[in-house]
Image (cartoon, helix red, strand yellow):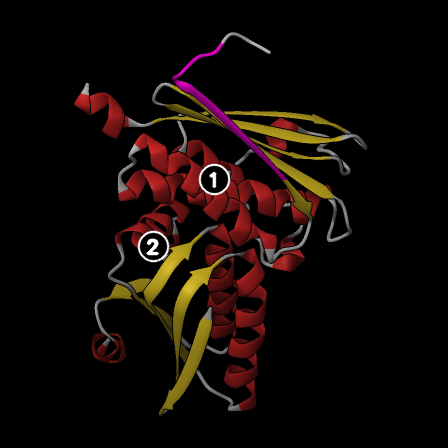
């Protein structure tokens, strides 16, 4: 899995590419938290559009980042257009807590 | 030797309980299932279900220790049966473990969705477990792509 990050104002934008499972989510969690806390950011945007696979480990990863953002009064949003990823998000009930957008620009606009 | 059934096929793999093998296991089962002419959605379903079961074996069965995980798959006509087995610590209370969002390891940021995902994406799920002996997860899926053609 590949992970790239970008900072825009108080947003940490994280792009995930490849397969997100238990194995890859542990490294993703470390990297995201490092960028988020070291740069003292508020919000996170997770771009899942280029994920080819995601199991419930991805849900755990999002829930954990949701908690971090909420603790700082920030927000987490997801960019996803992938049917399978969306199905998993829906199943987990995460959509009640986190908003999904089609693009990063939309996610920033809120 | 059992009587030959041309509509039956079988495979078995065994690997060390390393998280890097989660991708290996799900890709192997998906490749085996490809002879059932699955839809992309069906393939994604079994990959996800296998991934969940193997992850459980690694995190909960062996608690990150070293052990062997066995994955077997059988095709009978248009049905795929998958068994994921570990020889680790076992599950004390299976029905509790199967409750949505229940996790015995909340500190690891596990969503507690593993069994729910397996139940949702497969047609049948059975869990057998003996404490200190191990856990055996049996799942089945009927491939509609093949039955539609007949």
The answer to which of B44 and B8 lies nearer the viewer is B8
Q: Residue at x 56, y 40 (%)?
A: B53
Residue A67 appears in the picture as rendered:
yes
B57 sits to left or right of B133? left
Q: Contact (CB < 8 A) between labels 2 and 1? A: no
Question: Residue A39 location, x and y as percent?
Answer: 51, 91
Which numbered marker is on residue A29?
none
Answer with the quarter of the image where residue A74 lies. Answer: bottom left
At a point 24% along the width and 61% down the height, the residue shown is: A81
Quadrant of residue B35 within the rendered picture: top left
Residue at 81 percent across and 33 percent down: it is B132
Horizontal side, residue A7 vs residue B62: left or right: left
Q: Which is more toward the observer, B107 or A58?
A: A58
Q: In which quadrant is the C terminus of chain A drawn?
A: bottom left
CA–CA distance between discs 2 and 1? 20 Å
Residue B33 lies in magenta, yes or no? no
**What secondary structure is found at the residue carrying circle 1?**
helix
Check disc 2: other Cα within 10 Å, few if <14, some if 14-19, many if 20+: some
Seen as rendered, the residue at the extreme top is B3
Residue behind mark 2: A85
The answer to whether residue B111 of the structure is visible from this angle is no
Magenta-colored segment: predominant secondary structure: strand
Percent position of residue B131, x then y: 78, 30
Magenta span contains residue B7? yes
Give the extent of the magenta segment.
B4-13
Residue corresponding to mark 1:
B29
Q: Chain of mark 1?
A: B
């Amino acid at each position: 899995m590949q992970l790239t990050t970008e900072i825009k104002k108080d947003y940490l934008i994280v792009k995930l590419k490849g397969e997100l499972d238990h194995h890859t989510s542990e490294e993703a969690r470390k990297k995201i938290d490092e960028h988020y806390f070291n740069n003292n950011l508020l919000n996170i945007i997770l771009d899942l559009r280029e994920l080819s696979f995601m199991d419930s480990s991805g849900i755990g990863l999002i829930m954990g980042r949701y908690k971090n953002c909420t603790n700082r009064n920030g927000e987490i949003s997801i960019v996803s257009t992938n049917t399978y990823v969306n199905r998993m998000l829906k199943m987990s009930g995460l959509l009640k807590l986190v908003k999904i957008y089609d693009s990063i620009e939309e996610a920033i606009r809120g | 030797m059992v009587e030959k059934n041309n509509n039956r096929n079988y495979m078995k793999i065994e690997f060390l309980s390393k998280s890097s093998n989660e991708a290996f296991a799900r890709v192997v089962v998906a490749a085996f299932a490809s002879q059932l002419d699955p839809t992309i959605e069906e393939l994604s379903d079994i990959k996800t279900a296998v991934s969940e079961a193997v992850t459980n074996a690694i995190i909960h069965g062996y608690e990150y220790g070293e052990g062997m995980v066995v994955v077997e798959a059988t095709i009978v006509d248009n049905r795929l049966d998958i068994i994921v087995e570990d020889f680790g610590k076992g599950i004390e209370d299976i029905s509790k473990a199967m409750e949505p969002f229940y996790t015995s390891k909340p500190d690891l940021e596990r969503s507690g969705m593993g069994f729910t995902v397996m139940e949702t994406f497969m047609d049948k799920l059975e869990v057998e477990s003996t404490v200190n002996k191990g856990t055996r997860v049996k799942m089945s899926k009927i491939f509609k792509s093949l039955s539609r053609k007949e």
